[in-house]
Image (cartoon, helix red, strand yellow):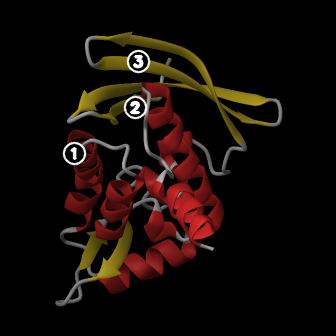
Amino acid sequence: MRQLILIGFLIVSSFCKAQTPADAAKCFYEWYLKAIKGRNVKEHTAIVKKGPKGETLLDYERYLHNLDSVGCVADTFKQSEIARFQSCQDYFKDIPYAIYYDQVDNDPFTYNVPCPFFTQYHWVSDMQPWESIKVLESKIKEGNAEIQLELASGANRQKRLILVKLIEGKWKITGISQSL
């Protein structure tokens, strides 16, 4: 029985432990695809909420917590995610939540320009989740790596360049380029 418990613990604790740069890149996308398929928005992006004074606010604390939990994302990547949400937050600073709610209920694309993550999954640049991930190429040099991934869904394919860095003995994502 002890052996079964130990084996179970090792399986769970090894989830998304990036042993190689490619593991880190795949780890993030495996988590992200699973999260967007689960349809719980606050798991994988910022959400809009009503502030204490009736203002419109973005809340991305759960998302950042999940990025920490994945274990393959560098703090610099999380900071870039906060910066990515900033233009949306700035846009909402003077819009009462009641107005936001009425407008988005009538047309979800109302806020597509300042907040494109409302209408598409950011890291797959689509409105549908993708089905699979494949490592196409890995370039590793002195604690830094570039991993080229291919996302696939049926006959559709997209490539991503994932920047990975060795930080305190662990490979972590520092950036993702969506345009190759």
Residue 109 in view: no
Q: Are marks 3 and 2 in contact (CB under 8 Å)?
A: no
Amino acid found under the numbered disc labelled 2:
Ile
Nearest-to-viewer mark from 3 and 2: 3
User: What residue would you read off at disc 1?
Assistant: 75
User: Which numbered dot is residue 142?
Assistant: none
Secondary element type, mark 2: strand
**On screen, residue 89 above or below 33:** below
- Residue 159, image quadrant: top right
Task: Give the x, y percent position of residue 123.
Answer: 49, 42
Is 6 placed left or right of 68 in the picture?
right
Sequence-first tag of 3 and 1: 1
Q: Which residue is mark 3?
A: 146
Residue in the image at 36% along x and 81% along y: 99
Q: Nearer the viewer, residue 112 or 39?
A: 39
Give the mark nearer the N terminus: 3 vs 2: 3
* Residue type (three-letter) at the residue carrying disc 1: Asp
Instruction: Name the N-terminal-most of marks 2 and 1.
Output: 1
Left-right relation of 157 to 89: right
